[in-house]
Image (cartoon, helix red, strand yellow):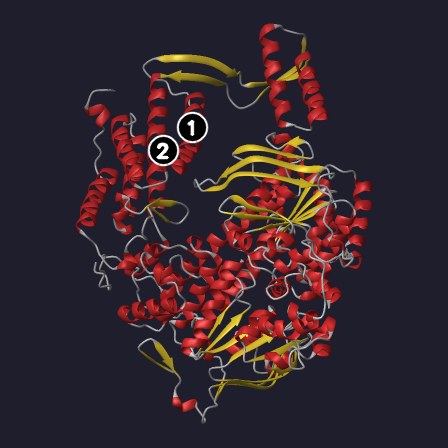
Amino acid sequence: MAIKGEQYEVSPAHMEGNRSVALSSEGLWWRYPTYSDTPNPWTLRNIALEVEQGECFGITGPSGAGKTTLCRTLLGILPYSARLTAEQLPQHFRGVINLLGEPVTAKTAHAHQMGMVLQDPENQFLRMSLLHELGLGLQMQDLANDEILQRSYEALRWVGLEHLWHGAAYLHPADLSGGQKQRVAIAAFLALRPQVLILDEPTSDLDPVGKREVIETIARLRRDYRMTVILVEQDPEILTAFCDRIALLHEGRIELVASPADFYAQRTILEECGASVGELTRISWQTGYTFESRPPLTLEEGVAAFAPALASRTFKVQQEPVGVGLAPTQPVGLASAQPVVEAEQVYYHYGDGTLALKGIDLTLYRGEMLALLGPNGSGKTTFAKILAGIYRQTKGRVQVLGKDLSSRKVRRLLPRSVGYVFQNPDHQLFCRKVSDEIEYGLKNLGMDAASRRQRVSETLAAVNLERYADEDPLFLSKGQRQRLAVAAVLAMGPDILIVDEPTTGQDQRSITDIMRLLCDLQGQGKTVLIITHDMTLVAEYCQRVVAFRDGLVAFVGTPTELFSEPAILSKTGLRSPTAAALAARLRQDKPDLPPILTVVQWKSVL
Amino acid sequence: MNSSNSLSTDAPYLQPPPGRRYVRSFLFSRRISAPFAKVHLIPRTLLVLCMSGVQLRAINATPPDIISASILWIVSLALFYCSGMQAKTARIYLLLTFPALFSLFTTWIFFNPVPGRAILWRYPLYSGTLVLGLAVWQLLWLAIVVGYFLWTRKLVTGIFIATVVAIAQTLLLPLPAWTFARVAFFHPLTILVSDYGLLVAITKVIGYSGMVFTTIALVVTSRDAELIGTLRQLRAPHVIIFFLSTVFRALNLALTDYETIHQAQIARAINARPRSFIRRLRDLSSIAVPMVAMMIRRSSEIGDALIARGYRLGQASADFYETAPFRLIDWIVLACCLGLLYLAVGPYSNMTVVLHLWQ
């Protein structure tokens, strides 16, 4: 591949007519080495793939399916960085991988023919300034500075960040947003002019703005440069929008490879493997309406599939969503509900002088599930940390269960009343045994040993982790660690539970598990506050929404009010879930159609 | 020393980002235009080392050279000011420095009885013999400590209160005591404040605070790219340069993780009850579990990211806007360093004696 002007050109050496293979694998098996006598199970099992040049090839599958391992193997990191001897190698690795007709070897990873962007943007920012980060790989190639500068600037332009070039030597990773960091990671590889770019869940740790930025970047790479992209992703909408073909990986095997249209038509396989599917697909599966004998994938296809079914129906004009007997969509009688949190004119200044909150007025009620929404930096997490007593407000009054948080003593004892579950479970697991982890907070609260033991066993039963009581939390799956983190907070008996991004980077089954647990807690009368970017989750589970923007409350109301009013969406900078967007689109032609937010509601309507 | 870069400071990527006044350094932020940061890292480091050497010389001279220490203190304060540290952070560090310096002053004054020309205050503290016996004040002391612990679960505060009460009681209202034996142990201790002791203590405070200011100034002004450039200029092995660069980035991530983990501890009621020193240590050690877990996960990904960028062990890499050429100001600072080095190791003339402030 050579560069001419601003565009990549595919080298004719690898072209065979209009079709050429960029990357292929045959009979690929891999298992991780172990220190015990019992070998690990195979992580990859007989993988056979063929990715064409210029193709965007999607890989999806549940957590633990082997997606990241496959990426590492395709790049040649595995098995060649695993330090296996020639005798050990066949026990762990079998098969052939070819990149542009050449076998992938230990040297492939260093040859800059392939790039790999990882999930967490922090871990791939290897230097402390943007300029040096972009130049790092090129420095290793011993290129002249002028060449490095030219390539770095072009790469930055390709990802739409050319405005950061001015002052690049002074920009620290902490000065960039998550989306910008991920785009810089992509740019750092683009500067190396790779033939193939592997993106391993590049958007899963990002807020909607960051997600949109990265998606637009991938779209640009596809549109303008025809780059070969392997995109590992859970989000079906992203896969549908960008991929020519999608592979389903499950327990190390490729179960299905098909175009998006055919892929999401395979309901049985997708359901068996627990793959994430889009809301339009779920509506289609639930109702039986299809577009060209398959589930619709875009809003336009959705309109074409479902509009005929609605045409003959008449609806009583109403503003409330359709009642479908689904508990979460039932509006809460807030007027009669008991306030548990009352915040008045709350301000918060960070140490560096940043004004994070600019006068927040908000009341939370007992027994509601409330979503705290807003882009990164809007102040929602800061506000939640004030409610949990982690931060103290700079100005204003906050009362939790009638107690004023200005008092240090009240804040110290607040974990009895307010539980805070952090986004990453690994940040909050302090012990080497699951049962000790539950006990940790109880000991801090000064509970006696007998009561502690009883509380531990009750809590483990509540989150279905009893059989792991003696396990090391670090060896649990991410979904189990997330449940344990909730359980550890739950054991302290809080009336209010704040959960930060409970579903980020998790597959559909883990999301369902954790949300079922939170719904049970809500059923027990606890107030649940969820900080999230997942609008589907908001529509399906939350009764009330608070949207933050620039340190101010931009909206308080129900999900129906939020998702059915374009003006409010525009003001808050949020996006409707697909089910709600479909209803809004269909209401243009059928004004009596009530606001519909969820797949279950669509099922009842259709 | 020449740079391999054709460094044009007018290039947009080398200009500060529009509207920004501060840039992040190792641990802090500093003003982009900070004068001390304009000096090359090598002369900057040498200046701090040489100034510290002269300060130590002034402190340890006989008699202590308070005049030289004060002059250097003023220069140190100027360097601290010129480091471009954010005013709020600077205030915090000054506040943190004062208690340390105050304890240094009091420790020297009270526990280093040097006779001078005049003794300002004398107080015998320990006679040189241990008295074995029983006294009412001991029972009183024990009762207060135990009672306070049962009431509040605080030990150190209880000991402090009991000691104050016991001393006050001994001075104001002597109560019965029964002596069984006297055993000679150590030597008598006396608090003795002399004019010379005062001079030594003040000079030490001035000298050490000056060293603190210059060290902070050096840390505040240094950036990782600068250090890597300097190591390149000093022909350090590539492995070490790359290792240090990765360590700096990893430390940055570890600090962020530590902050979140500590917040998670607060959310798990770590502050709910008063904590003993031992419990504080235990809580601190429990941070190790998530820190290590995070570091293992991060190091695996950082390793992948490095390999994907083409890094191999021992891989050399070209200089890319890391090294900086020596300019006139750097040579001037180096000349100053030579002068300071002479003062630090050469024949010393004590300014305090020369000016007849102490004979």
Residue that appears at 62% across and 63% down: A587
* Callouts 1 and 2 in the same chain: yes
Where is mark 1, residue-wise? B104
- In the rendered structure, the answer to whether residue B91 lies left or right of residue A41 reads left
Amino acid type, residue under disc 1 in the picture: Leu
Residue A456 x, y percent position in the rendering: 78, 48
Where is mark 2, residue-wise? B208
Q: Secondary structure at mark 1?
A: helix
Residue that appears at 63% across and 6% down: B174
Is residue B261 placed above or below B89 in the rendered structure? below
- Badge 2 local density, few (<14 within 10 Å), some, or many (20+)? some
Residue B84 x, y percent position in the rendering: 32, 41
Q: Which subunit holds the residue at mark 2?
A: B
Q: Are marks 1 and 2 in contact (CB under 8 Å)?
A: yes
Residue A573 x, y percent position in the rendering: 52, 54
Residue that appears at 66% across and 28% down: B154
